[in-house]
Amino acid sequence: MAITEMGAAAEVDETQGETCTPGLACLLIERDEAERLAVMLKAMADPTRLQIFRIIERAPAGEACVCDLADCLGFRQPTVSHHLKIMTESGLLNRERRGNWSWYSVNYDGLNRVRAILNPSVAPAAATA
């Protein structure tokens, strides 16, 4: 139904017995937070990044080195590093430099923010790492 005038929309709704819902919460999250979450979700919306995230999340020590990830995935190290950079910049992973290597672990604050937007009835848990 295409209605061009606000008054016409109200008339049509009243004659059909339909009313707008008063008290609708129009802003569930602030715009800045929505933009940060969108970056995180975009970072996860890639099959390789999902695989990387799962490998790191389930690693025995809770962390993984770039060289180990490249071996697991069968990709060259620069490709894996590119994906890790995107995930780190989005707030999904932590990066710790040790000598010549970078080690990555799950950023639980970022993960909990994603969980909260996907399941708003569950309050974000405190960071565990």
Image: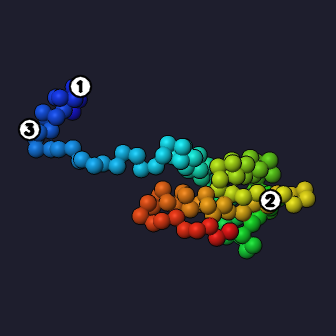
Q: CA distance from mark 1 to mark 3?
A: 17 Å
In this rendering, the answer to whether 79 lies above or below 127 is: above
* Callout 2 amino acid: Glu
| Residue 43 in sight from this viewpoint | yes
**Residue bearing the label numbered 1:** 4
In this rendering, the answer to whether 92 lies above or below 60 is: above
Q: CA distance from mark 1 to mark 2?
A: 56 Å
Place residue 62 in its image quadrant: bottom right
Where does the C terminus fall, quadrant-wise?
Answer: bottom right
**Residue bearing the label numbered 2:** 96
Q: In the current view of this chain or complex, which residue is farthest to the right?
A: 99
| Residue 54 in sight from this viewpoint | no
Measuring from the top left, give residue 91's x and y in whole percent: 65, 53
Task: In the rendered structure, find residue 107 and report the number of the disc placed on it.
Answer: none
Q: Residues within 10 Å of mark 2 (few under 14, many from 20)?
A: few
* Callout 1 amino acid: Thr
The mark that comes first in sequence, 1 or 2, is 1
* Callout 3 amino acid: Thr
Q: Are marks 2 and 3 in contact (CB under 8 Å)?
A: no
Query: Which residue is depicted at the point 44% across and 60% down?
Result: 120
Of 60 and 6, nearer the camera is 6
